[in-house]
């Protein structure tokens, strides 16, 4: 019997071909939009906090006092949204291209090119401005952007070895810089095990890290905040895993997370409100709400209240679900992918680098004791954020964009 070439189409049978995997997009506009949201949350919080934690202006509606500042106190958590975004943005290119060979030297070089040049430019400029202001006493009685020059300290601050006294906001960059060193190990572990398991294990490590036995050595090495906040970064890796992996290859419960992202976001909001750290003038940020409710029943707050571990507990789940909702819910994806949010996200790093000196300068030059509530409201929450955005936009084109062409975002 002769064998001939068999063509299934010639006999009316459709050829069965293996399904092609959907190619992951290289750019996700909603992620840029979330960057813009995080940047403005921090700006609005600092516009209140760096102006003295004012308890006014507040207004009365139907006899109920409405303090405006309460709208902006959760803004500090924009930092933790940035941390989740960092975990996502670092891991998504690797997870979205599973066939690509890992280029860790290239990854390290891209991080240096992306982060260091704009930071170095801004740090040196702010340092020189502070020295000039102090020498000529332009701002008497204030150490605005100023610290005495010491070669050892200057070099350590310049290269993100220790946090800056010139601009306190740069502490997050020091944390990020150390996170970049640990990222490859966590990504490899997440691939081999499961991102969800990695998050759970890191929570256990973070819990024990803030215990006195471990926190002493870690604190001396200035690694304690990083260790206790690693679960927040790992949430970003988990979100990237869920976004990049074909849905048919996800477990059923993981697909459930993507089918109802709004339910997860609502649960995360409820969780954050229940355990939300509160900010009060003269006090540290501390977890209060739930434990205030339980105190009459004799329940004492756990030992981790008052440590950075609490922020990983409160904000990690919320911003994980916010990211999933922004990427998978059509309405939220349209909002965060809109041009205003994306444009803010594009200049968010530049806004971050300059927002603290802009806010402090505005507070010194514009605020006056005789200003009434409406003028304070307009200054703190309209003029100051606008100035931060304008300064960030200008610096983006001068100190950031020229280096983007040589790095991969």
Image (cartoon, rainbow, N blue to C red):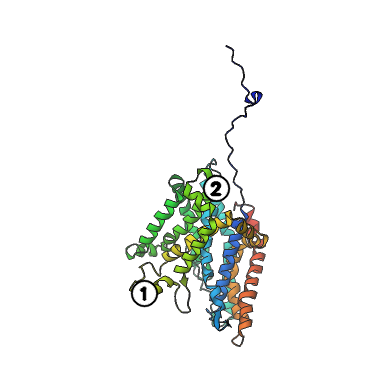
Q: State the residue at coordinates (46%, 79%).
A: 282
Work out whether residue 6 can be spotted: yes
Label 2: state its secondary structure.
Answer: helix
Residue under the image location 66 percent in, 63 percent down: 340
* Residue 212 position by quadrant: bottom left
- Where residue 399 appears, as percent x and y from the top left, is 63, 62
Badge 1 is on which residue? 295
114 over 134 or under it: above or below: above
Q: Nearer the viewer, mark 2 or mark 1?
A: 1
Question: Is 153 drawn above or below residue 184 in the view shown?
Answer: below
Task: Name the image quarter holding the N terminus.
Answer: top right
The residue beneath circle 2 is 244
Number of other residues with Cα within 10 Å of mark 2, as a class: few under 14, some 14 to 19, many 20 or more:
many
Q: How crowded is mark 1: few (under 14 residues within 10 Å), some or many (20 or more)?
A: few
Q: In this view, does 298 lie to the left or right of 355?
A: left
Give the alpha-carbon distance from disc 2 to disc 1, as whole Å.
Answer: 44 Å
Residue 248, how many percent across, how many down?
A: 52, 43
Identity of the residue furthest to the front in this view: 12
Dot label at residue 222: none
């Amino acid at each position: 019997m002769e064998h001939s070439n068999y063509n299934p189409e010639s006999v009316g049978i459709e050829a069965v071909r293996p399904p092609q995997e959907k190619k992951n997009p290289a750019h996700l506009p909603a992620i840029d939009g979330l960057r813009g949201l995080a940047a403005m949350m921090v700006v609005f919080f600092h516009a209140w906090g760096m102006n003295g934690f004012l308890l006014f202006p507040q207004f009365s509606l139907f006899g109920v006092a409405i303090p405006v500042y309460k709208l902006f106190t959760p803004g500090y958590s924009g930092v933790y949204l940035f941390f989740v975004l960092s975990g996502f943005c670092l891991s998504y290119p690797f997870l979205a291209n599973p066939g690509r060979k890992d280029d860790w030297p290239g990854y390290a070089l891209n991080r240096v090119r992306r982060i260091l040049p704009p930071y170095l430019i801004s740090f040196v400029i702010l340092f020189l401005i502070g020295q000039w202001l102090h020498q000529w006493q332009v701002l008497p009685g204030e150490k605005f952007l100023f610290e005495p020059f010491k070669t050892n300290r200057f070099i350590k601050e310049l290269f993100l070895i220790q946090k800056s006294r010139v601009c306190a906001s740069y502490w997050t960059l020091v944390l990020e810089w150390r996170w970049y060193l640990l990222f490859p190990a966590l990504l490899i572990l997440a691939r081999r095990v499961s991102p969800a398991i990695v998050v759970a294990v890191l929570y256990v490590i973070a819990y024990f890290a803030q215990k006195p036995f471990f926190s002493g050595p870690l604190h001396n090495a200035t690694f304690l905040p990083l260790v206790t906040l690693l679960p927040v970064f790992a949430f970003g890796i988990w979100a990237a895993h869920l976004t990049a992996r074909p849905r048919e290859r996800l477990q059923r419960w993981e697909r459930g997370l993507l089918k109802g992202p709004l339910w997860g976001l609502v649960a995360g909001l409820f969780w954050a409100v229940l355990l939300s750290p509160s900010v009060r003038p003269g006090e540290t940020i501390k977890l209060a709400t739930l434990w205030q409710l339980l105190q009459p029943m004799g329940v004492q707050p756990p030992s981790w209240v008052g440590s950075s571990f609490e922020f990983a507990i409160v904000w990690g789940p919320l911003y994980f679900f916010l990211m999933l909702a922004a990427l998978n819910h059509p309405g939220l994806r349209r909002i965060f992918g809109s041009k205003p949010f994306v444009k803010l996200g594009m200049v968010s790093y530049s806004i971050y680098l300059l927002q603290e000196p802009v806010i402090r300068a505005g507070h010194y030059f514009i605020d006056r004791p005789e200003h009434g509530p409406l003028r304070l409201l307009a200054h703190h929450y309209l003029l100051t954020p606008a100035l931060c955005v304008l300064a960030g936009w200008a610096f983006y084109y001068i100190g950031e964009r020229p280096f983007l062409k040589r790095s991969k975002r």
